[in-house]
Amino acid sequence: MESSEGSSRPERNVPNSGDEPHLKADAISFADGLAIALASTAPAYSLAAVIGSIVVLVGLQAPAALLVAFVPMFFIAAAFYYMNKADQDCGTSFSWVTRAIGPQSGWITGWAICVTGILVVGSLADVAVYSFFDLIGTDGLMNSTAAVTAGAVILMIVMTGVCVWGTEISANLQKTLMIVQIVPLLLFVVVALVKVWGGDAPGGAIDPSLSWFNPFAIPAGALSGAMLLAVFIYWGWESAVNLNEETEGDADKPGLAGVISTALLLITYLGVATAIVAWGGISGAEQFDDDAAILATYAKEILGGTLGLLVLLSVVVSALASTQTTILPASRTSLSMARAEAMPHALGEISGRFFTPVVSTVTIGVLAIIWYLPSKLISENFLFDSLSALSLMIAFYYAMTGYACAFYYRRELLKSAKNLLFIGVAPVIGALLLTYLFVKSLVDWSDPANSYTGASWLGFAPPAIIGVGFLLLGVILLMAWRVHQEEPFFKRRREIADPDLLTGKVEPAAALSGSDAG
């Protein structure tokens, strides 16, 4: 049972005060945060991995499916924006759910964020290395499991080191990599559409139509399946919010970076999807069902051999950049949990030289390698199944954030139409949609044939067992920590938003306070 409700005013609490090192304030700008938010989604690779399958499900309405999938993400981004106004804590959803709903819910939410880092970093590093070998034309290395695996582990170590080295270094790297990602995609879209409209495309090309963006033309079953694929390619934008304690400016900036990044992702995805469907038609895209080679293949046709390699480079850089940025939310969340005495104190150690959470960052990197190696050695398909399980974690902690936002601000919702819509209705609708996708994923995975391996574990597909298994492990660890820990974290009471938060008359909390409000 969650703790009883406390009063509303958040206390500003600067962690690790005095001579103890802390996260470096004003380390990155709003533009840096925006670049990190975009990079964390791995836009080029994410879209390449699913667009063929989406076309198989909904045909010409693929852009419409991407548009619908954007809705819950945008609504949850609104929840992040308003919760960050109340509490600028690098643990984001962990801290916010703890404040609004209670410490048990907050703990398991934070655990889910940490698990996403462990599950995904190895897969992204694997894709980056494999695609790099493809880019430079070394088929022997590309087809060598040992070479790809070794390269992925080295990349994970390097990117973990970059995260430790400093947030400014990470931000500067991401801004450069973002340019390398976006420019080739923009070139791809423009040239493809110009050639289609100019009659220089192959025989299967189709002139784009506004009807492609109409979700009501998609049967409900097909739309649901396409949404399940498409919604999670928007995941990762909240990395900017995890750097809220290190971002210059007021409390609006990190949350605003998250909101804007989702809109920019939508524009990027709609442009690329429209170009792909227009160039190859349905039959062309269907050949790449569950095949990320679609972008590179089409790019060679559209841009030619040399310029086409830039799009493949975009995919490589996309996975490379995301390998680094996806470490950030997990490391900051575990830091926040340790700071709140919800995890071992050692995870809260911050480097006095780099002002980054060195122990939590290295821990996430090491655990990611430990998960990746056996997964890769079992089979490539098992690695993909473990990546599929990621969707359960994402849906869970995003949904919890949406519910927490509406519940935390519940006394403010009826004070204006804006409050009701953006702080109440939108986050709850986003949370409900993600809850539905969580349940639908489990239902789909009750049939092992829907997984990459086709294996049956206790009658379910591996992604279901992996995802639910990690959540159950979290519950066990939560109970064990609660028994072991005599500190006040699990005695915290629920809080309600101070009415003055939305007017700016009271400062947001800097981090999760260990004491009850009020």
Image: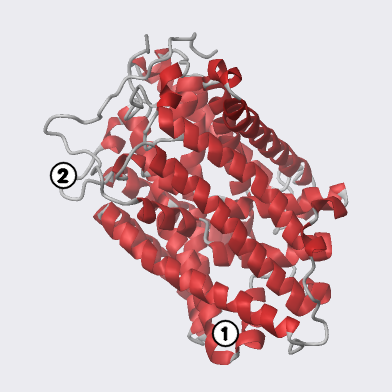
Q: Residues within 10 Å of mark 1 (few under 14, many from 20)?
A: many
* Residue holding disc 1: 308
- Count up the numbered dots: 2
Residue 437: mark: none
Q: Residue at x 41, y 38 (%)?
A: 252
Residue 285 lies, in percent from the top left, at: 76, 73
Q: x%, y% of residue 244?
A: 36, 41
Report if residue 361 is visible in the image.
yes
Residues 103 and 299: in front is 299
Among the two numbered marks 2 and 1 on one chain, the one whose residue lies closer to the N terminus: 1
Mark 2 crowdedness (10 Å alpha carbons): few <14, some 14-19, many ≥20: some
Local SS, label 1 = helix
Estimate the spatial distance between the alpha carbons at disc 2 and disc 1, rounded to whole Å: 45 Å
Which residue bears the numbered disc 2?
352
Examine the image and state in which quarter residue 498 appears: top left
Query: In percent of the image, x 32 and y 58: which residue is there?
Result: 170
Q: Position of residue 141 (x, y in %)?
A: 49, 81
